[in-house]
Amino acid sequence: MFIPAGGWFKYELEGALRLLSRIDFEVARTPGHCLRFAALGLAVVSECGHFEFWGQVPARALWLAFQLHDVGKMAIPWAFLSKRRRLTSAEREMVERHTEFGENILEFFREWHRAGRLKSPLGRFETTIGLRLAREIALYHHENWDGSGYPRGLRGRSIPFLARVARVVDAADALLFPRGYRGADWHPKKALEFLRQGEGKIFDPEVTRAALRLITPVAEAACPECPNPTCPLLQASLLQ
């Protein structure tokens, strides 16, 4: 198994979350990504109407699982994550391995948790469920509905439900907020077009429609200078 470097966060989930926040802010320059991801992820699960799911999974466990979706990026060279241009094929191959690195890191967390050595901001039951779901999300959140994704090439409902939610949420966040490889003329309304075009191809149709119901009013009302990560309309709407 892969053992991540930077052992200062060992046995401490909050340390891992702080590092992910730092990667978002300082390295990838996508401040607030993990928090927005978790907020929209919970909203989409609820919008899908999977009420039986909520009966089995505490909301705080699901929040933790979504926040840890990119935990594998802790094992990727930060020079790759901070690039302002498109990656080469070799660089992209390395970055894509963050899904498998994330699975391995979370398996370590689960082992430490079972041994009673993991410090967690949640209770034991919530942490147990959250880590199990986080492992699925981390490994499969780049699988596509039509089987064209990575790392396993799963398709359709063989992809775990939360990973299908994460695939849509990750794309929505990337489309609604700035990325270094995108021109300044990008507008959130283009995110809607991309998500609609990807329905049934890249994205689970049910999940896509649920996400669009949530973000369409935000994107259509966004001010002309968006995308802007400090736009109060966009931030307040996505995090409410």
Image: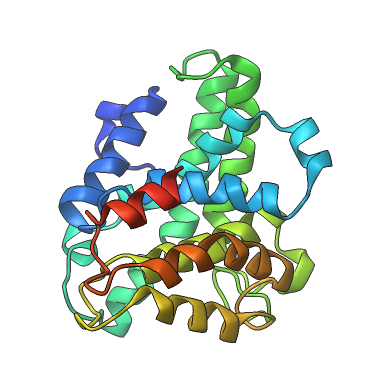
Seen in the image, is 159 located left or right of residue 78? right
Q: Is residue 122 above or below residue 217?
A: above
Percent position (x, y) of residue 172?
Answer: 46, 66
Front residue of this view, candidates 90 and 21: 21
x 70%, y 63%: residue: 159
Percent position (x, y) of residue 4?
Answer: 34, 42
Which image quarter: residue 149?
bottom right
Q: Is residue 69 visible?
A: no
Front residue of this view, candidates 55 and 212: 212
Seen in the image, is 110 located left or right of residue 92? right
Q: Is residue 45 above or below residue 203?
A: above
Front residue of this view, candidates 144 and 77: 144
Instruction: Count the marks.
Output: 0
Seen in the image, is 63 located left or right of residue 220? right
Percent position (x, y) of residue 22?
Answer: 22, 43
Percent position (x, y) of residue 216?
Answer: 52, 68
x 65%, y 31%: residue: 129
Q: How is the image coloured?
A: rainbow
Q: Is residue 95 visible?
A: yes
> Of all residues shown, which one is farthest toward the bottom?
197
> Of all residues shown, which one is farthest toward the right?
52
x 23%, y 79%: residue: 181
x 57%, y 29%: residue: 60
Q: Is residue 97 above or below residue 73?
A: below
